[in-house]
Amino acid sequence: MKVSVIATVLNEGASLQRLLDSLAAQTRMPDEVIIVDGGSRDATLSILQAAVQAGRLPLRVLVEPGANISRGRNVAVAASSGEVIASTDAGVRLAPEWLAALVAPFERTSPPQVVSGVFVPDVETTFEIAMAATVLPTLAEIKPERFLPSSRSVAFTRRAWEAVGGYPEWLDYCEDLVFDLRLRQRFHPFGFAPGAVAYFRPRSRLGSFFRQYYLYARGDGKADLWRKRHLVRYLTYLVALPLLLWLGWWVSPWWWLALIAGAAAHLYVPYRRLWPWLRTLPWRERLIAVGWVPVIRVTGDVAKMLGYPVGLLWRWKRLRHHPELDWRRPSP
């Protein structure tokens, strides 16, 4: 069975080498690696060209200026020749068994059409530890039957990719979720490979995290994803929070206990994830990490509340003339 690994890159000069090194160290080497560059202006292309010349990987580099992530992935898949496509991203390093674990389910008697890998935080600073605890699920939290894989760590057959029309090129963020959901319509259940680990470094600055979550939420709006989740967030911050503050100030301070209880519930999961990390940190860093969690949580929620309506407005303006935006229609 021939296996192709694909990825897209754009200005990833600072992080690309660790992806290439981890691909070269796989226990099951890919038959080909195809990386599409979307028009990088840094050292990305020179790093890729050096990797081609070094010959450690069966690497092909394609340049598609202006391509978004979806377009880049579709170009890479179309140019590949493997029966199975394994997708990853720049900005990660892969466990040595990553590809072997992803491919193994396809070699069974009744193979799935899609196999979910996983990604885990690869942290370097106290802020990144707090970030990982706040926004990234642990392996123990993943329910394989409901899990929607990131394209940092997923494999699918060429047949499955063709059946759903590839990645949605009209969508610049959350494209892998729409791709996953369309695959699940046709090929549920997915296989699950917990040993296919991609180590992913979370955002290291609050400003870049805000922008990331704003764009994610804008993508949710464009794709009409997670309506209930976004509605609950608006009701929490714009209705419940002001109401409890007003009741606590004008009616009875006991209402503030409800506010504290709600905040504790909102932060329980991040602090539960943070606990194992805290035991590895000095006391000062522990306090800093604990303090960052609510800041990160609120920043992410605000970014989502700002980004989601922007995406919805974009969708409403285009839906009538672009039927492909109605992606929930069954594939022919």
Image: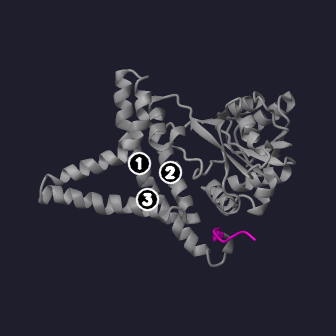
Q: Which amino acid does label 3 sit on?
A: Met
Q: Give the range drawn in magenta.
A: 325-332
Cα separation between marks 1 and 3: 10 Å
Q: In this view, does 208 lie above or below 164?
A: above
Which is more toward the observer, 217 or 85?
85
Q: Which amino acid does label 1 sit on?
A: Thr
Give the residue drawn at x 43%, y 29%.
276
Give the residue drawn at x 64%, y 36%.
197
Which is more toward the observer, 13 or 166?
166
- Image-quadrant location for residue 168: bottom right
Crowd tier of the residue under label 1, counting other residues whose Cα lies within 10 Å: few below 14, some 14–19, many 20 or above: some
**Magenta stretch contains residue 323:** no
Which is more toward the observer, 206 or 248?
248
- Image-quadrant location for residue 296: top left
Which is more toward the observer, 330 or 298?
330
The residue positioned farthest toward the front in the image shown: 109
Total numbered labels: 3
Q: Mark 1 points at which residue?
A: 299
Q: What residue type is labelled 2?
A: Tyr
Q: Is residue 3 above or below residue 146?
A: above
Tell me the tag on residue 305. 3
Q: Mark 2 points at which residue?
A: 213
Is the residue under label 1 in contact with that under label 2 (CB below 8 Å)?
Answer: yes
Cα separation between marks 2 and 3: 10 Å
